[in-house]
Structure formats: structure tokens, C-alpha cells
Amino acid sequence: MNTLLLIFCAIALIGGLYAGFARDPYAKLIAIGIIAGGVMPLIIARGYVDVAAALALIIPLSTIFVLQLCKKGAA
């Protein structure tokens, strides 16, 4: 189980590094999704299933709002 958690930590770190170096706003959104994919199992492993359920609702909604802001800035 520890190796699986290390893999998820690595996924979250890779997403964080990618978000730090990416210049395109859409690439940053992809990186935020990678971070969320790595952090979500870590939250569940600690037993905070209610927090994971809230994040499962908040992350897609925030992505939609950020996409609308990116579209508004491009026009």
C-alpha cells in the first residue's frame, strides 16, 4: 500500500511541476487536474471521504469557471 501512495504522491508532484513550468492557461488546467488525480486517493487513504466527495464536486466546477475566464480573456 505504501508504494501505491508513493505513486500518487509522485503524480501530484509531477502535476505541480508541470503547472509551474507551463505557460498556456489550458495546460495549467490540465496540470491542476493531474494534481487533483494524485491528491484525491491520498485524501481517501487518510479517511476523509467527505472531503474527497466535496472536492469531487468543487474541482470540476472551478475548472468550468476558469475555462470561461480564459475564453473571456482571449476575445
Image (spheres, helix red, strand yellow):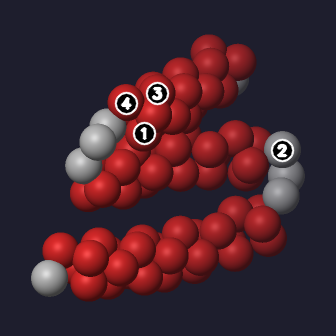
Cα distance in 3D space between marks 3 and 4: 6 Å
Which label's residue is closer to the chain start, 1 or 2?
A: 1
Q: Is residue 30 above or below residue 18?
A: below
Residue 20 location, quadrant: top left
Residue 31 rendering spot, x and y as whole percentages = 39, 45
Q: Which label belongs to residue 19?
A: 1
Quadrant where the C terminus is found in the figure: bottom left
Helix, strand or loop under label 4: helix
Q: Which residue is mark 3?
A: 17
- How crowded is the residue under tag 4: few (<14 C-alpha within 10 Å), some, or many (20+)? few
* Circle 2/circle 4 CB separation < 8 Å: no
Real-space Cα separation, disc 1 to disc 4, in angstroms:
6 Å
> Looking at the image, which residue is at 42% across and 53% down?
33
Q: Mark 2 and mark 4: span between their CA atoms?
A: 30 Å
Circle on res. 46: 2
The residue labelled by disc 4 is: 21
Q: Look at the numbered discs 1 and 4 and tell me whether their residues touch, using CB distance below 8 Å.
A: yes
Q: Label 3 amino acid?
A: Leu
Question: Mark 1 and 3 residues: CB-CB less than 8 Å, in contact?
Answer: yes
Classify mark 1: helix, strand or loop: helix
Between tags 1 and 2, which lies in front?
1
